[in-house]
Image (cartoon, helix red, strand yellow):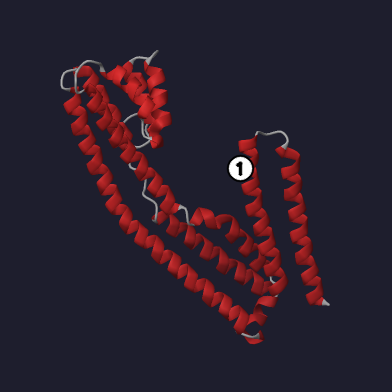
């Protein structure tokens, strides 16, 4: 009877949360546009998968803590494994800054246009990673002074490399002569910065791989012990005290995984333009 009660409780919990999430999606989807609706649909699907996973784990094990832990893992797993993708996107943006600076230098090469005009012309062919920021800069330059527009551009990029680019452009605008050569030298400086960050990212990628391997080994050991250990091993977790111990263990594992993810992401370098961070 107790096993049946646990099973029914787990299924009821899963069905209830599923109904709540489906209801929230149904009542709000009509009030938002299609892009927001699609994003919310993906968000809801992940949570529905988490609810289903938690219900199955509760049904199989009879341990509510395992059900909650499994559901949390489904929800946060994409965040935990996204560190490498975030770093790749950040480096791609920095490489886009280098490419854009070289294009600006090419536009200024003949010497027939000014730097402000070259920036506005470059907005049409800016690298996609920074196209929005460059387009905004070009629009500001039509009505703003050069220096405030570049400072806002640095804030939009929100990176030390962006500060280097903005400061170099301000210097090139101030002196005028030799702007093309200055931008070429600035692009080389940005290239060196990107190369250093990419080399550091290789080491961080190894850390992330090691963390994933260790987490996988721990998960296999835990599941193997739970499934094959017999009642002599798993019986202790059928009590309230056992569930409390298991919750503490899973919380520590989750905290360790989050800490390892933080170690696997490049710390944001301090900026030297704009408001202090």
> Where does label 1 land, which residue?
39
Residue at 31% x, 17% y: name it. 117
Query: Percent position (x, y) of residue 87?
Result: 39, 49
Q: Residues within 10 Å of mark 1 (few under 14, many from 20)?
A: few
Query: Percent position (x, y) of residue 109?
Result: 19, 23
Q: Look at the image and tell me whether residue 34 can be seen.
A: yes
Query: Percent position (x, y) of residue 264?
Result: 39, 56
Q: Is residue 153 above or below residue 59?
A: above
Q: Is residue 130 above or below residue 201?
A: above
Report the side of 143 relative to 4 (left or right): left
Report the side of 54 relative to 99 (left or right): right
Of 104 and 201, which appears nearest the observer? Answer: 104
Q: Quadrant of residue 138?
A: top left
Residue at 41% x, 29% y: name it. 133
Disc 1 secondary structure class: helix
Q: Look at the image and tell me whether residue 271 can be seen.
A: no
Residue at 53% x, 75% y: name it. 220
């Amino acid at each position: 009877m107790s096993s049946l009660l646990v099973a029914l409780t787990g299924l009821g919990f899963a069905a209830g949360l599923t109904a709540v999430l489906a209801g929230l999606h149904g009542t709000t989807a009509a009030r938002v546009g299609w892009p927001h609706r699609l994003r919310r649909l993906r968000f809801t699907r992940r949570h529905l998968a988490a609810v289903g996973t938690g219900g199955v784990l509760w049904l199989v094990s009879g341990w509510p803590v395992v059900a909650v832990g499994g559901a949390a893992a489904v929800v946060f797993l994409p965040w935990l494994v996204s560190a490498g993708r975030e770093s790749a996107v950040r480096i791609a943006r920095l490489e886009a800054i280098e490419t854009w600076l070289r294009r600006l230098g090419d536009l200024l090469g003949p010497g027939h246009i000014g730097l402000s005009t070259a920036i506005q012309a470059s907005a049409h062919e800016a690298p996609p990673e920074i196209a929005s920021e460059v387009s905004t800069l070009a629009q500001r330059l039509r009505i703003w002074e050069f220096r405030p527009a570049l400072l806002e551009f640095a804030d939009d990029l929100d990176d030390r490399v962006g500060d280097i680019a903005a400061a170099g452009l301000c210097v090139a605008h101030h002196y005028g002569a030799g702007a093309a050569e200055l931008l070429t030298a600035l692009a080389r400086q940005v290239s060196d910065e990107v190369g250093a960050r990419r080399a550091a990212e290789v080491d961080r990628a190894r850390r992330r791989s090691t963390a994933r391997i260790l987490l996988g080994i721990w998960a296999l050991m835990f599941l193997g012990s739970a499934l094959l250990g017999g009642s002599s091993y798993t019986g202790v977790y059928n009590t309230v005290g056992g569930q409390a111990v298991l919750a503490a263990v899973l919380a520590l594992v989750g905290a360790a995984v989050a800490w390892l993810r933080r170690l696997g992401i490049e710390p944001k370098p301090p900026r030297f333009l704009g408001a202090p961070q």
